[in-house]
Image: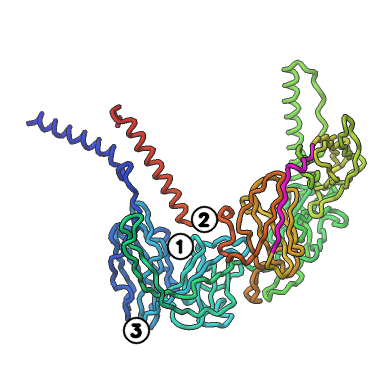
Amino acid sequence: MKPLLRRLLGGAGIIAILYSCASVGRIEGGPLDETPPRFLGSTPAPGELHIQKKKFVIEFDEFIKLDKPNEKIVISPPQVQQPEIKGSGKKVVITLQDTLKANTTYTVDFGDAIQDNNEGNALENFSFSFSTGDRLDSMAVAGILLNATNLEPVKGLLVGLHSNLADSAFTTLPLERVGRTDSRGYFSIRGVGPGNYHIFALQDADQNFAFTQPTEIIAFNDSIIIPTMEERMHQDTVWIDSLTVDTILDHQYTHFLPDDILLRSFKEIHFSQRLAKSERLTPEKFSLYFTAPADSLPLMKGLNFDERNAFVIEQTTGRNDTLHYWIKDSLIYQQDTLKMSLTYLYTDSLKQLVPRTDTLKLLSKLTYGKLQKQKQEAKEKLQKEREKRQKKNGDEVEKPETEFLPVDVYAPSAMDVYDYITFSFTEPLASINKDAIHLKQKIDTLWKDVEFDFVHDSIDLKRYHVAAEWEPDESYALEVDSTAAQGLYGLWTDKVRKEFKVKKLEEYGQIFFNVHGVDTSAFVELLDGQDKVLRVVPVVEGKADFYYLNPGKYGARLVEDTNGNGVWDTGSYAEKRQPEMVYYYPMVLELKANFDLTQEWNIFEKTLDKQKPEELKKQKPDEDKKNKNRNNQNSRTNNNSRNSGRNSGQGRSY
């Protein structure tokens, strides 16, 4: 008996091993389960009236899971206390924490949060409703939310209704009925009763369902929303086979309106002025960072130094909100701590700009003595390494190299006809000699001097530009003599030589837009394949022309510049001002060398949500991502099946 028992157990073990190797997950090559869970019933039943209890159980035909329930599941009216929502086997259990309101329709909108446990197939747009009164409100309003700056679909924002039409309702009262945008920016607000409403979108940072934080993203509609419904018909076709129709069935259904509300989200600009940060990373420089632009520089009084003519002030943004003070006097920057009083405009509790004076103590994170020691040690280390290499190669040991002022020279070997040369220094300059800069053009075998303009950058005081009338397909050389420029702290520049050739005109293309529908000042931004701005031109007499473009793919975005300041401006809820309108050319253009493209552009030809090309969108629909993952999984499965077939008969290892 014992030998027989051992043989039986051994056989069972082998079968178990073979089964475990061959049966992990579904059978390779089999079809994927693409069917979402099916609703079977609930306690209480959907649409039930006079409900008083706060716990609900919803049942499905298979095991389910909840995907990001706190983000995707929305309850109307919105709940102050977070409800408890759990997936358990084939059930979803909901427990509300807030007290139920009398005579109110409650709607739990799951979006696509309910998925089957195996493949993650989502039950789309599933909702559950009940009423605490004797009536169930069943109407709905729907639409799409876009980012006002770039027409991107906005995912995951609350969209809600107020029956209180006062302007203050949005800022003082919680939204009454809410929905949430999906990955395409679409939203649907369900359980809506008859009446007049205002509609809003809100990034609810403090979770009070009202616009109470100035940094929250919002959207609002200027029109009143009046929910309605109408009976419509749709047809279902029954096929005998792929070519033959058996029957066409007409079905009547109720359609809710409006279903095409378009909201454009934005963040308001609040100029709350204060000193955000002050720092002194190196002895020679300290920086002040303010939270908003200012019309004037702050007033400074040195408490342990003389501030008169002591600095070169660098305004990196040109708006006085980020200031770098380069200290000219060595007696000042050698001090470890600088003490000063700073007077600047400050936004008080009444939102008024008033003068404020702070006392600052700026301690250098790296003292002057320590910095000099580090520089000297670095020099000695480099010299020792150089001498070691020279001795190893049998070369004569050279003297230490002269330290020069670092400068980065932008002069690409293939220069665009519209481009210019740029000098970028690491510190402000004490002086620069234009006569030490030479620009030459190669004619036959000789280099001929050419005229050029030398200008200081309008924002960055450490940057200078050399511009000239480049001749296409010609060679040029930039030569800079040694000691052409001296830095603020005494170092001189080394000599520089750069050779480059200007591109041929045949290497470029042009795009010309004939713009229709614009009745205000506007500008067009030319975009690359990642939706980044490459160039900007104003719309003049209905035309926006872009010359000397390199071959590639381009998009275009038009901004209605209603105030004529040359930039896109956001909106303001308090002023009931919508953000400036933005339109996209609905195609990505592929430009080839030596080609001109002339495009007619009617900005109203397509609705806003259909304008931005899919290639330029960063917010991709979740279903597209799922289909891509599923296709990848199918591809891997098919490859595994083919490999399995090739390996059959060759034995397996476990």
Left or right, 444 with reference to 117: right
* Residue mark closest to the camera, 3 vs 1: 3
Q: From the viewer's perspective, is residue 326 above or below residue 68?
A: above
Expressed as whole percent of the image width and height from the top left, the position of residue 86 reads 35, 62
Q: State the mark number for residue 364.
A: none
Quarter of the image for residue 279 reads: bottom right
Is 514 magenta? The answer is yes
Q: From the viewer's perspective, is residue 60 above or below residue 283?
A: below
Earlier residue among tags 3 and 1:
1
Q: Amino acid at mark 3?
A: Asp
Q: From this viewpoint, is residue 100 visible?
A: yes
Q: Residue at x 47, y 74 (%)?
A: 141
SS for dot 2:
loop
Task: Check disc 2 and report the residue beneath it.
Answer: 620
Give the Cα distance between marks 2 and 1. Answer: 18 Å
Local crowd size for mark 2, using a 10 Å CA cut-off: few (<14), some (14–19), many (≥20): some
Expressed as whole percent of the image width and height from the top left, the position of residue 182 reads 48, 62
Expressed as whole percent of the image width and height from the top left, the position of residue 104 reads 40, 80
Task: Check disc 3 and report the residue beneath it.
Answer: 134
Q: From the viewer's perspective, is residue 50 above or below residue 13?
A: below
Q: Residue at x 70, y 72 (%)?
A: 348
Q: Kindly check if marks 3 and 2 are in contact, taking CB atoms under 8 A apart as contact.
A: no
Q: Residue at x 54, y 73 (%)?
A: 200
Task: Check disc 1 and report the residue beneath it.
Answer: 71
Left or right, 106 with reference to 580: left
SS for dot 1:
helix
Q: Amino acid at mark 1?
A: Glu
Expressed as whole percent of the image width and height from the top left, the position of residue 115 reads 36, 58
Q: Which residues are magenta?
A: 501-515
**253 or 88, nearer to the observer:** 253
Earlier residue among tags 2 and 1:
1
